[in-house]
Image (tube, rainbow, N blue to C red):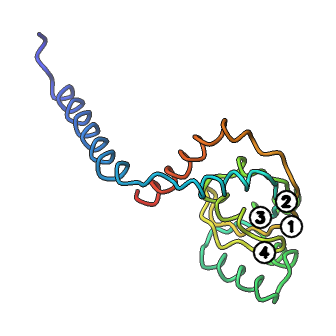
Amino acid sequence: NKPLSFEDRSVMREHAQRTLSNVLFQRAVMDSIRTPAEAEIRKVHGQMGYALRLQRMLFSDRAEAERVRADLTRREITWAEAVIRYADVTNALQADRGPRWFSRMELPPRSARVLFDLETGAFSPVLGEDLGYAVYQVVERRDARPPAWGAIRGAIGQELRGLEADEYR
């Protein structure tokens, strides 16, 4: 029966507020998210049946990334010229490694959703990433063996629900 100090009451108040906010998020957001349609889940599973060879350019400024992407799509500049002209340290390191192969599961779900819908040679829209803003180009596509449907179906559904929850956040 130790009396509660100011710090103890503060910790309890913070815990109560966090609990209430988590319950509110569950009720207001997560409960309103629809269950992904079977067609959406099958589409993602189909995307796991191939790998993409991607090259990436990183930018610290979204406006610059949009401008370079526009130049690339209008064919006013080549990828190599863009890397040289707009290279920062991250771009220089990326350019040294060149294009790399990625399966759908190796990329963040938000990026994978966009990139695996692109055709070979296409440029991605500007994508926000941890390191800044990125523009990708699909260099090549090759077949890969997708995971077994029964083993991955639930995980795909959770991924799609998580993407929708992120949009609400």
Among numbered discs 3 and 1, the one appearing first in the sequence:
3
Horizontal arrangement in the rendering, residue 107 relative to residue 7 (left or right): right
Question: Which residue does the image show at 72% across and 80% down from the upper left?
Answer: 68
- The label shown at residue 65 is none
1 and 2 marks in contact (CB < 8 Å): yes
Q: Residue 122: which numbered mark, if any?
A: 4
Residue 138, how many percent across, how many down? 81, 67
Which badge, 4 or 1, comes first in the chain's sequence?
4
Quarter assignment of residue 140: bottom right
- Point out which mark residue 53 bears: 2
Three-letter residue code for mark 2: Arg
Q: Which residue is mark 1?
A: 139
Q: Residue furthest top?
A: 1
- Dots 2, 3 in contact, CB < 8 A: no
Q: Earlier in the sequence, mark 1 or mark 2?
A: 2
| Residue at 81% in and 62% down | 54
Give the amino acid type for the residue marked by disc 3 in the picture.
Answer: Arg
